[in-house]
Amino acid sequence: MAVDIQKEVVRIINQEGLFLYGILTKPCQENNQNRLVISCQSGIVAKGEIGDHLRWVADRLAEQGITVLRFDQHGTGDSQGECEQDIPVRLFFQRVQDGCFVNDTLSVIDWVIKRFVDYDIFLLGECGGCISALAAGAERLKNIQGYILIAAPVLRFSITNNSKFQIGVLDARNTSKQYHRKFFQLSSWFRFLSGKSDMKLIFGSIFVQLNFLVRKSCSIIFPHPTSIPENPAFNMLFWKSFKIIAEAKKNICFLLPQLDNETFEFNLEFKQKILDKHKKLFPTCKVILLPDTDHSIMFPQSRGLVVSSILGSINKV
């Protein structure tokens, strides 16, 4: 039996005086739990584009009595402002990781606080939106009850044009497995020797894996004694914000899609080296692996697991 939900287009003024447009998905009054989730997207997609950013999450949460606000940051979707024309995606995403949408998120939080008095507020981040959620939440610590972060990137995106740096460790491993299977195929050797194979991908994958093995060996021989990230590429805005929120004993739930490079990096650089080794410092932090789930969460079974995990995290507060 379908549960009635309502949708409302809202307009919020950010700190630069630009209008940010969003969609409120609300439960019917008799089902309202006085809980609200602000969805922070990566900035590369918008709330109304193909896929309608996390609309399925908003609808299902509203059916459970939880209000959800999805909004477009400045320069994206329906919101005012302009992004640079023809800006490379990697450079744009690095700016997201550096916090270019944090002020927008703060403006949205302040708007919600004024309009939804006595509501418990949660921040839901997805990919680069996790940085916006953490950094803004660290500045509105008393107003946010909990955080749900999907596919959180812990390493800063490289903007180098050298292709070997653009290959994730997980992709490099998969590439090596594919070419290992072709090792005894004469046709594959012919393609390789004739230069028809993707040489940049092959040698880039070799470089990435060698680099990984060197760093892994060094971490074993010279173990990192503190709870500070050791990788120079670690996003320190992520770390600084996370530490503030964790020390305040706020609930933080990380949802990690299994079929995602960010998950591999998260496990290697953050979970194994920091969270697992210093569990007493982060008692309110939880990590949930989403089996057979891709970065965009396209599969129906994955979406059901994501919604149940979000509900579990919210109901824990």
Image (tube, grey):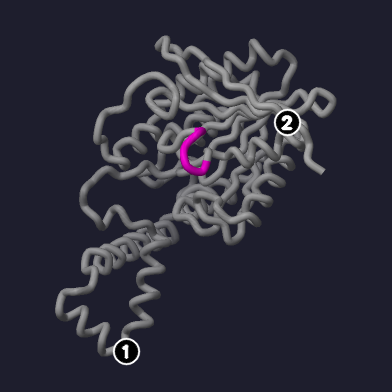
Residue topped by disc 2: 5
Q: CA distance from mark 1 to mark 2?
A: 59 Å
Q: Where is mark 1, residue-wise?
A: 184
Q: Is residue 270 above or below residue 23?
A: below
Q: Position of residue 19 (x, y in %)?
A: 45, 15
Q: Secondary structure at mark 1?
A: loop
Q: Which residues are magenta?
A: 47-51
Q: Secondary structure at mark 2?
A: strand
Residue lying at 38% horizontally and 75% vertically, measured from the top left:
178
Which x, y percent locates residue 280? 65, 42
Q: Residue at x 82, y 29 (%)?
A: 31
Q: What residue appears at the point 21 percent right and 48 percent down from the top-left corner?
A: 161
Pinpoint residue 278: horizontal percent, then vertical percent. Answer: 59, 45
User: Total label count?
Assistant: 2
Q: Crowding at label 1, few (<14), some or many (≥20) Cα neighbours within 10 Å?
A: few
311 vs 221: above or below:
above
Residue 45 in view: yes
For label 2, count other residues whose C-alpha is less than 10 Å away and answer few (under 14), some (14-19) or many (20+): many
Judge left or right: residue 221 versus residue 48: left
Residue type beneath disc 1: Phe
Q: Quadrant of the N terminus?
A: top right
Inspect the magenta stretch and tell me whether residue 72 lies in it.
Answer: no
Q: Which amino acid type is shown beneath numbered disc 2?
A: Ile
Percent from the top left, x then y, of residue 61?
Answer: 70, 36
Q: Quick check: marks 1 and 2 in contact, CB under 8 Å? A: no
Say above or below: 317 vs 303: above
